Amino acid sequence: MKKLMFLISLVLIASFTLTACGPKPTAAPPTQPPAPATQAPTTAPQPTTPVSHTLVIAMDISDLVTLDPAVAQENTNQFIHANVYDTLVTYKAPNYDEPVGLLADSWDVTPDAKTYTFHLKKGIQFASGNPLTANDVVFSWLRGKYMKVNSFFPFIDNVTALDDYTVVATLTAPAADFLPMISSPAFGVADSKVVMAHGGMDTPGADTQDTAKQWLDQNSVGSAAYILTKWAQKSEVVLVANPNWRGGKLYFDKVVIKDAEDPTAKLQMVQTGDADIAWAVSFDLVDQAKADPNLQVVVNQTLDTYYLAMTSNCATEVSPQTAAVLCKKQVRQAIAYALDYKGLIDAVLNGYALHSPAILPIGMSYIDPSLGYTTDVAKAKQLLAEAGYPNGVTIDFTYNASSQRDTIAAKIKSDLAAVGITANLKPLEQTVYLTQMRAQQLPIGFGSWTPDYLDPTLWTDNYSCIDAAGIAHRMWYDNKAACDLAKQIKAEVDPTKRQAEIVQLQQIWLDDAFALNLYQPQTITALNKDIKGFTYHPSRWMDLSLLSK
């Protein structure tokens, strides 16, 4: 969020229709009285069938675990939820520093950044036709809080409605990042009447008694442009146009998101016309996509972090022998020096990535380019010897499997072997990996972190405090100095002090070496050449309401 360096470009082609006109022929004078006027029809004209347009997107949706906005935590759900649920504020390209009212007309913040008052827009309807009021905001946010899944909601102490269009949120501690945070789709506002009718709750005990998840996995009750009507796991997600959307008629009245995990098959779908958009084209297929005259290829810089995380727990449930090795800081530092970051980006990713010095990605504020690890085989061997492994060591390398990650894992295995670390590759199916990672069972993980919102605190919170639900929690990282700094950063309204605190935190991260930023990829989108209106967003990916042909 802050000063982003995005490569966002898209040429919109406008079409014009030319009409020709000429002089009208002179009518001959009548030679007989005009016929009597035809009697007006007594039946109403039959309506014409509206033109239907379906958009098909080829995308890997295998990470979806749920589409209940109060509990979903994956990447793909952010894209889907951003198109079916509205938030109070949003951030639009290219000014990601400036909040824009979506459901809120305006807002007030107390000097201590603990109380936020929102004044809602009037006249907004849900897809159900019910009016959107402050009570729906209260219900949606409190349901998120009491479901006890999403790590953002514990910062909320209470939410109340002063009247139908005024919401007051009081926080447990000062949060200078609250506006960016509530732009996350997790804070999307749902129709409280419909969710409650299907077992939804916004009171303590919701985590064990709320029964709305199953219904919300197949339906949505938001006020955004589209409505969820189907999710078949690892198959497809279907959205249809919201007839009550305040933005008017959409060009595409149906969107089908097809699961396409194989990179080649994904590109072939858009080349053959079976899809209109191929999302996240594999780096080794970009030249093939660019050579197709029927496609347009768009490259954008992400804020995604592809990380290597290592446990601080010396006895994890999975591969405890590996945990006993990785819980030593010198081993983690040795691995950090062993990795060939530039070679990884150039050889495996074809140069379509950046390497940030610490976990905070390039494009966010307060990056210190002088920090970070560089490849140093001798230093890595020295640290390994200091940790008690002068003759090398063997570890299990668990990771979230995909064709691209398989290739990268093989490159990491090769880098580690050069310093005496034998890595047994242990690819896991995505849902298994995510489940075990979140349960703190894995000693090592190679995964990705896509921002839910655009502020440095998205990283400083989740990579610093073991009591949050982020990577620090999953890897048993418990450094009080790091967590205290993260809490200061969250509350800090002075930008100068905030900058110094973020730089200091990055230095602690690097010394502990529990999570390494391997690369920060660019994303490549291949579209049918007739698709117009595509724009990229780092957390919401694309706005379906803007697309047309």
Image (spheres, rainbow, N blue to C red):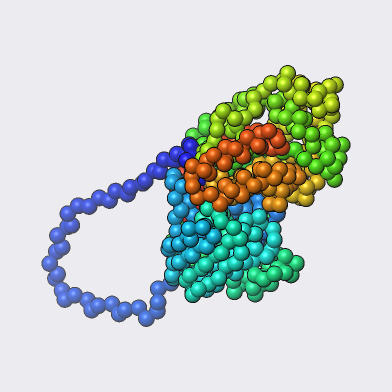
Residue ID at (76%, 45%): 476
Residue closer to the observer: 400 or 165: 165
Nearest the viewer among 193 and 13 is: 193
> Left of 335 or right of it: where is 496?
left
Name the image quarter holding residue 203: bottom right
Q: Looking at the image, which residue is at 53% across and 49% down?
A: 492
In the displayed structure, 335 sits above or below 440; it is above
Question: In the displayed image of the protein, which residue is found farthest to the top?
Answer: 378
Q: Estimate the x, y position of residue 402 in percent, counting from the top left.
A: 71, 39
The residue at 48%/65% (across/down) is 118
Question: Residue 175: x, y in percent?
Answer: 55, 55
Against 396, residue 223 (above or below) is below
The image position of residue 521, as x and y in percent, is 59, 36
User: Relative to 362, does residue 217 appear above or below in the rendering?
Assistant: below
Q: Relative to residue 234, is residue 101 drawn left or right? A: left
Work out whether residue 219 can be spotted: no
One can see residue 455 in this view: yes
Q: How many marks?
A: 0
Foreground residue among 346 and 519 = 519
Residue at the farthest right position: 321
Residue, x 83% and y 43% (percent of image)? 316
Q: Is residue 273 toward the left or the right of residue 70 in the image?
A: left
Percent position of residue 334, x then y: 74, 27
Quadrant of the rendered image containing residue 170:
bottom right
